[in-house]
Amino acid sequence: MQQPIYADYTTVENGWTVTVTCDGQRAGDRVEGGLVAARDRADTLVASVAASTGHRPVVHLLDGDALVFTTAYLSERLGIPAVARTEQAVPPVVTAEPGPTTVESDPTTVEPEPVPAPPSEDTGEPTG
């Protein structure tokens, strides 16, 4: 299996620095604007550095972390504001208040009184 190509992104004032590494070769550039523009530039750098190696997977890293890159990139593509991205990813755990100690029956689920069986037909024969 071939080694992946790494595209590492770091923030700089008003943009990003993109560094692509492939088989010991490196190419980099500074990109003004958002992460989407930096990702587009990374594709160009990957094509120039890995032109002779054929199709290989590219691992995109934001400050060395692929999950952080994916989260930031998709958030920007979907238009989620930066403030929402930096807030806590997992909502805090809220402790529920204790419920009632007695269980009350729901009137809509109360079983009806049993209906008596209809009288049997009188056949005229003595019983017993």
Image: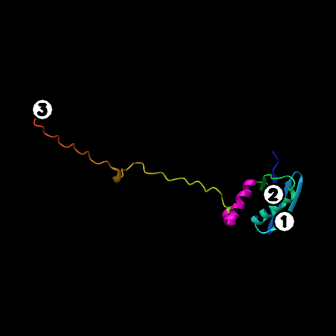
What amino acid is labelled 3 in the image? Thr
Residue, disc 2: 8
Residue 71 magenta-highlighted: yes
Quadrant containing the C terminus is top left
Element under label 2? strand
Majority SS type along the magenta span: helix
* Label 2 – label 1 distance at C-alpha: 12 Å
- The residue nearer to you, when weighing 14 against 99, is 14
* Percent of width and height locating residue 20: 84, 57
Q: Is residue 33 above or below residue 99?
A: below
Q: Disc 3 versus disc 2: distance between alpha carbons?
A: 97 Å
Dot 1: within a 10 Å radius of its alpha carbon, few (fewer than 14), some, or many (20 or more) residues?
Answer: some
- Proximity of marks 3 and 2: CB atoms separated by less than 8 Å: no
Residue situated in front as seen by the camera: 127 or 116: 127
The part of the image, by quadrant, that contains residue 43 is bottom right
- Above or below: residue 33 compared with residue 110: below
- Position of the N terminus, as image quadrant, is top right
SS for callout 1: strand
Which mark is in front, 3 or 2?
A: 3
Residue position marked by numbered label 1 in the rendering: 30
> Badge 2 local density, few (<14 within 10 Å), some, or many (20+)?
many
Disc 3 is placed on an element classified as loop
Q: Quadrant of residue 127?
A: top left
| Mark closest to the chain's N terminus, 1 or 3 | 1
Q: Is residue 74 left or right of residue 106?
A: right
Q: CA distance from mark 1 to mark 3?
A: 105 Å
User: What residue would you read off at disc 3?
Assistant: 127
Residue appearing at x 70%, y 58% in the figure: 71
